[in-house]
Image: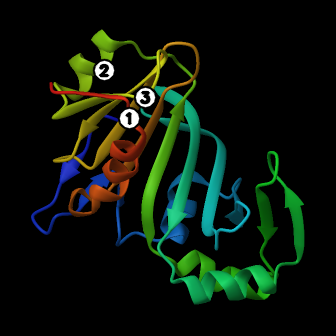
Amino acid sequence: LPWQIEVLADGGSRVFGLTLAHSTLGDARVRFGIDVEIAVIAAPGEPGSLEAYYNNITAGLLMGKMILAADLDRETVRRLRERAAKTGYMTGTTKKFILHRDDLALAWRAPIAGITFIPVASLDEATVLGRFGVPAERIRIDERAEHFLYPEKGLDLILDSKGKEVLQYVAPRQFARLREPLIKVAPVTTGP
């Protein structure tokens, strides 16, 4: 389940049966099945990142969408983009570069840097606090979205009063990757 996060002694974590920074996209494919899209996703002016996308997975009793971000260096991502078999648009100007079949073996060996889970079921504040505990910090971005930050678990849970909740997982030792962009744009920061 999304709240079953095992924190490891090396500063890593294990969630959904995957160890962040150690398990590979191929490990996720074995665990969740072959019904997955894998591509480099890039907004204009960005190098992009290799991602695997599951439109429908079951995590315990919860169903949802899952995005797995690979840990690859910029040069490798650039080569994957250049060799893409097909390019298309996702939303607006964000592009999706479908990998060349010769690059799939490399992609499946890539370690997982982060996991994003978007549950079908809506979560409310009481459920979040009951399942995940009191966050170390709460950052409200606007009137509808608030980030519940759990650095010790490597989790940023976005509670959205008018949309879907988003759970972002990284190894706890890499939590600054999730928090730092929020501090730059957040109008209000509150404690637990």
Local SS, label 2? helix
Which residue occupies 32% across, 48% down? 179
Three-letter amino acid code at the position of disc 2: Val
Q: Dot 3 surroundings within 10 Å: few (below 14), some, or many (20 or more)?
A: some
Local SS, label 1? loop
Residue 174 position by quadrant: bottom left
Q: How far, Cα to Cα, is label 1 from label 3?
A: 5 Å
Q: Position of residue 85 (x, y in %)?
A: 88, 77
Q: Mark 1 points at which residue?
A: 186
- On residue 141, the disc is 3
The answer to whether the residue labelled 1 contacts the one labelled 3, judged by CB atoms less than 8 Å apart, is yes
Q: Dot 1 surroundings within 10 Å: few (below 14), some, or many (20 or more)?
A: some
Split into 4 quadrants, where in the image is the C terminus?
A: top left
Q: How far, Cα to Cα, is label 3 from label 2?
A: 18 Å
Q: Name the residue under label 2.
A: 128
Q: Looking at the image, is 54 positioned above or below residue 119?
A: below
Three-letter amino acid code at the position of disc 1: Ala
Q: Looking at the image, is 97 positioned above or below residue 169?
A: below
Residue 16 visible, this orientation: no
* Number of dots carrying numbers: 3
Residue 128 position by quadrant: top left
Q: Which callout, 1 or 3, points at the residue further toward the start of the chain?
A: 3
* Residue 85 in the figure: left or right of residue 155: right
Local SS, label 3? loop
Q: Looking at the image, is 76 positioned above or below residue 22?
A: below
Q: Where is residue 112 in the image (x, y as percent from the top left)?
A: 45, 66
Residue 73 visible, this orientation: yes
For the view shown, which residue lies furthest in the left direction? 9
Q: Position of residue 184 (x, y in %)?
A: 38, 46
Which residue occupies 35% across, 58% down? 177
